[in-house]
Structures are given as C-alpha cells and as structure tokens.
Amino acid sequence: MKILKEFNNFLSIEKEYSSLENSNVAILSAPLEMTVSYGKGCSRGPEKIIEASAYVEFYDNETNREICFEQGIVSLEPLCYDSMSIEEALASTEKITKQLLERSKFVVLLGGEHTVSIAPIKAHLEKYPKMSLLQFDAHSDLREEYEDSPYSHACAMKRVVEFLNPSKLTQVGIRALSKEESIFIKENKINTFFATDIRTGKWGLNWQKELVSTLSDEIYISFDIDYFDPSLIPSTGTPEPDGFFYNETVEIFREIKRQNKKIVGFDLVELAPIKGLSHPNLTAARLIYKILNFVFS
C-alpha cells in the first residue's frame, strides 16, 4: 500500500499526522464505476472529496477538538480496477480493507458506486460479527439483479444480506424502491425508515432516537450521498426529491453517541462531481470529518 503524496492527504495535513505508521484513520479511495445506470462520474468522487477536504477546518466546535492531529489520518493511493471483473474488484477491495483492520486502522472507504461497499462491509463483519449496518440512501438497493447484473449498484444491499442477517440492517432515507424490494423488506424484517414515514411523523419528532435504537452496540455505516436532498447534493447519479439535510443527519450521529454505541467503520459513495460546482464535494468532505469527530470523541 502506497501513501499518496502529501498534497493529496485528506485535509492537506502534514506528513507528521498523515503517514500510515502514525495514523489511526485510513482513507481508502475505491473509484469503482462499472454498473452505473443513469448519471455517471462517481469514479471521480474520491479524488474530488480529498481535494475539497483541504478547505475543511481542523477544529470542531461541538467536540472542541482537532481530531486530525490527535488521531492522524492517512490517505492511501487510490485502488486501481483496470482489467478486473467486478467480482475481482470487490475481492481486492475486501483484502486491502482486511489488511488495514489487521493493523488496527479505522477505515473510511470513498467510492465509487455503491456496489464497492459490499467489500468493506464484509471485511468489517469478520472483525465485528455482532455489528449492525446503517445504510443512508434514497434507494433500498435490494433488487436481486438490475440490468442483467446481480452486482449492480441497485443490488448492493441484496448481496450484503446474503452474508449479514437482514434484521441487522437499518435503512434510512429510502424513497425509491420496487415492489419486489418492498416485499423483501417486510418478509425479512429489515428496519427501513422511509422518507415518507419520517416526514409524516410515524416516529414522532425524535425519529433519530427510534432509528438508533434498532442498532447493535457496534455499527458500520454505508452512506450513499443520494440520501441527501438534491438541493443540497445534486452531484450524484440518481438524485431523488424529498431528501434529507445536514443537521437532521448529524443528529443521528449525536444520538449514536448518546446511546453509547460505537461506529466501527464507514464508507461514503456515489458522489458524481459536477464541473464548476464545488459545494457538494466540500459538504461530503465535511461530513466525513464530522463523523470522525463523533467516532473519536
């Protein structure tokens, strides 16, 4: 594993705080883009997030800390998927994630399409067999196959629940799915917090508390950026209206902290940068750093 040049480090922090040896956090860029079905460009997401992170402040006023200097954050050379099948790409990504976990790194994977999340979820489940999976997404991603591929980004969570008990999956923000997926959710008792149910008050004003209560003490997070409302994040392949906003999302992480639960790793995927539009890239970078502040505070 090679370390990126210093100017490509997350937050542009100095090598003193961003080498593999002295960092507790590892940023793994996984620019997989093989099955995107509508808007394209998510393979450029990781590099644009890291580029934008140079403009994120080190200090977090909520935790009163500069986590990047306390923990160290290394940005690893982006994975290369040239000439690989999607199965080979996932196997390679899983192997590298496992290597990082064996070195006691907290892994943040940046995609790429949502299919790539299968690999770090599987690697983390091996280390944390009791973990829950919290999926932020506009789509349920539970199709058996899509466009003749069982590894389409629309099938990512269906592949995951082949090795993760479906009752360990909690979804939030879902507002686009097929009838097939709706039936699967009900039959397998998946904890799905639909956008319409949240907006119409099914779980009351403190829906974040109800959501976090479905999770075990150890949590892996898979964050598809299209969970957000397109007015906040238009830069994604399949944007959906009636999405979510930054503060109500961060409140979920506050609630995880209040319930003394632990985030063991996370990925952020499906950012498809738009030329000349920088705020989605910066918002994604800021969210990553904000989550890390909750992880280590």
Image (cartoon, rainbow, N blue to C red):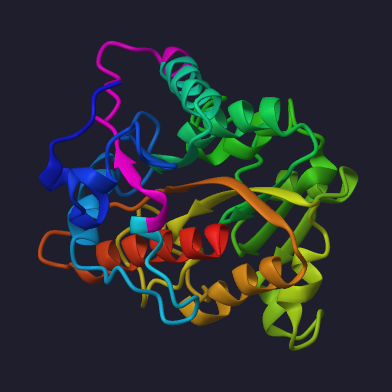
Give coordinates of residue 237: x percent, y percent.
35, 52
| One can see residue 184 in this view | no
Question: Residue, x 32% and y 67% (percent of image)?
Answer: 234
Instruction: Based on the picture, tell me whether residue 82 belongs to the magenta stretch.
Output: yes
Question: Residue, x 45% and y 60% (percent of image)?
Answer: 226
| One can see residue 90 in this view | yes
Question: Residue, x 57% and y 80% (percent of image)?
Answer: 248
Instruction: Based on the picture, tell me whether residue 9 belongs to the magenta stretch.
Output: no
Taking the image as shown, residue 81 lies to the left or right of residue 140, namely: left
- The magenta stretch is 70-88
Give coordinates of residue 46: x percent, y percent.
28, 45
The image quarter containing residue 214 is: bottom right
Instruction: Check the picture and name the quadrant holding the C terminus.
Output: bottom right
Question: Residue, x 60% and y 44% (percent of image)?
Answer: 141
Residue 24 against residue 296 in the figure, above or below = above
Taking the image as shown, residue 229 lies to the left or right of residue 262, namely: left
Q: Along the line of sight, which residue is nearer the eye, 187 or 94?
A: 94
